[in-house]
Amino acid sequence: MVGPTASGKSDLAMRLAREAGAIIVSADSMQVYRGMDIGTAKPTLAERDEVPHYLVDLVDPEEPFSVADYQRESRRVVTDNSDRRILVVGGSGLHVRALLDPLEFPPHDPTVRLDLSALDPKEARRRLEAADPGAGAIVDLANPRRVERALEILEITGLTPSQRAMTGSARSVAAYEPLLAFAGFGIDAGERLAQRIATRMDSMVDAGFVEEVRSLRGRLGVTARAAAGYTEFAAHLDGELTLAEAKKLTRNATMALAKRQRTYFGRDPRLTWIRWDAEPEERYRSFRAELDRLGLWTS
């Protein structure tokens, strides 16, 4: 179950998991971090006691946790629970595909990365295009980090982006051919999403988000810092932003995230989109109706 943030995925999944006796595997890039509870809308301890949740609270926020790490751990959970019903729930599209599809993640080499980081971005781009004139169709050449990573992979594996795109697994990924069989559903609050994000922002502050950010100051690694709200509210604690400004910037960042999520999931032809309704009960009925229609629901 996927879709943009604040669309009601978690509540819907919790209800289905209760009724179906399922476990939930989080597909959220930030819920893996301990202590980042309010800002990531992490399931509560009571909810986790009621329904087993996996890929939540795995590492401390100082530690890196890559998509490749997620792929390894999530596939292990699925294998270990193959005799159970499994709900994968979240808004991190790449993480969902890392679990379900044959994505491959080339290795990193810190020495190579250090050498490449010293390059001027224009020179890095020139090198990549010289090695692979077709790289622009695969790599965002305007993004220096993507160019640097493509050069790192080329140095380590000897494969250009165009060559990697021609492998069997890459073609399967491009064709949305899964490695694991699944039924996929999307949920999107549509025009109500902006208001739901604003309401969630207020609820986060009321629940103690400022104090959560204070407790994590100086502890967030590069990956964890990317979570919406933590950098903005740290700036508020440093006196650089008012509370109202921090909230506004966080809302804007969350809306930008939702836009990217809509674009990403909108490309996936395997998803059945659930009719959204402001009433949670109606949303659940719509979901159940889709499950019944597809012959997937068993009481």
Image: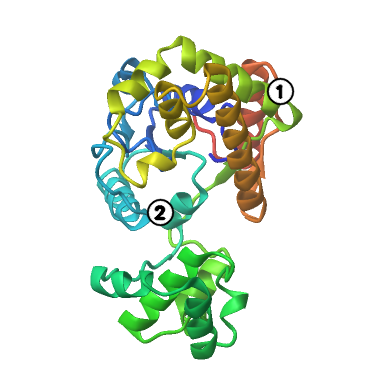
Residue 172 position in % (x across, y down): 52, 71
In the displayed structure, 227 sits above or below 121; it is above
Q: How is the image coloured?
A: rainbow
| Closer to the camera in the image, 142 or 267 | 142
- Disc 2 residue type? Leu
Q: Which comes sooner in the sequence, label 1 or label 2? A: 2
Who's the residue at 27% across and 34% down the image?
A: 218
Judging by the rendered image, the residue that carries numbered circle 2 is 99
Judging by the rendered image, the residue that carries numbered circle 1 is 277
What secondary structure is marked by label 1? Answer: loop
Who's the residue at 46% across and 50% down the image?
A: 96
* Residue furthest out toward the front: 239
Residue 298 position in % (x across, y down): 50, 32
- Disc 1 residue type? Asp
Residue 211 position in % (x across, y down): 35, 16
Residue 207: mark in rendering: none
> Can see residue 122?
yes
Q: CA distance from mark 1 to mark 2?
A: 29 Å
In the displayed structure, 115 sits above or below 4; it is below
> Hey, which quadrant is residue 37 in on the image?
top left
